[in-house]
Image (tube, rainbow, N blue to C red):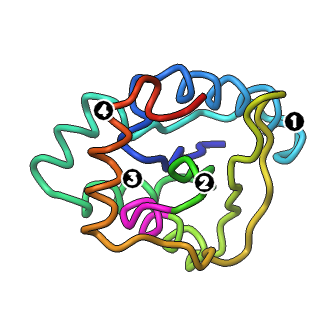
Amino acid sequence: MRIYYAHPISDYDTTHEQMVQRSMNLVLPAFIAGYVPWIENPNLPIHQEGYAARGMDHFMDVIDGCDGCVFDSFPGGIIGSGVAMEVKRFLDQGKPVWRVVGAFCGYGFERVTELPAWVATRETTRELSKLYRSMPNGGRL
């Protein structure tokens, strides 16, 4: 199974990002019939190049080829506008979506069937990204 990891850019190249991906490999097989997922991380050079050339259309095409999604929010639970757009695409296609939960004792995943209400505007997303990128580990403890 190919699972897309939708998360704020402030989490790119952080310990948090690495730990969530490890947890995806350990925990998700219980949800997806024992399969270890192939994690499609938008924080890869090929996706950064695709985004530079085509914007969010690049990620929409990647999403169409994935089987499900794990998404993460900013610290505090607000979901960035780009992550929300990606999650909505999965939900509209009837594909499974899980939200990252936990942190101190390890990460878990909670299945969601609708987009949570706490979605930031584009402008707020940009400001939060800038703020959290200036902090160690993307503002995560």
In the image, residue 80 lies in the stretch drawn in magenta: yes
Q: Quadrant of residue 112?
A: bottom right
Mark sitting earlier along the chain (4/1)? 1
Mark sitting earlier along the chain (1/3)? 1
Residue wearing tag 2: 69
The numbered mark at residue 134 is 4
Task: From the viewer's side, name the closer residue of 126 and 69.
Answer: 126
Query: How far apart are the two marked residues, 1 and 2, measured between alpha carbons?
Result: 16 Å
Q: Position of residue 99 (x, y in %)?
A: 69, 55
Looking at the rendered structure, the kind of residue marked 1 is: Gly
Disc 4 element: loop
Asked if residue 93 is positioned above or below residue 10 in the image, the reply reads below
Looking at the rendered structure, the kind of residue marked 2 is: Cys
Task: Please identify the residue farthest to the left as the structure is shown.
Answer: 53
Residue wearing tag 1: 34
Q: Position of residue 34 (x, y in %)?
A: 87, 36
Disc 3 element: helix
Q: Mark 1 near mark 3, Cβ–Cβ under 8 Å?
A: no
Specify few, some or many for label 1: CA neighbours under 10 Å numbering under 14, 14-19, or 20 or more.
few
Looking at the rendered structure, the kind of residue marked 4 is: Ser
Residue range corresponding to the magenta coloring: 79-86
Q: Choose mark 2 or mark 4, whichever is in front.
A: 4
Q: Where the N terminus falls, by quadrant? A: top right
Query: How far apart are the two marked residues, 1 and 3, measured between alpha carbons?
Result: 23 Å
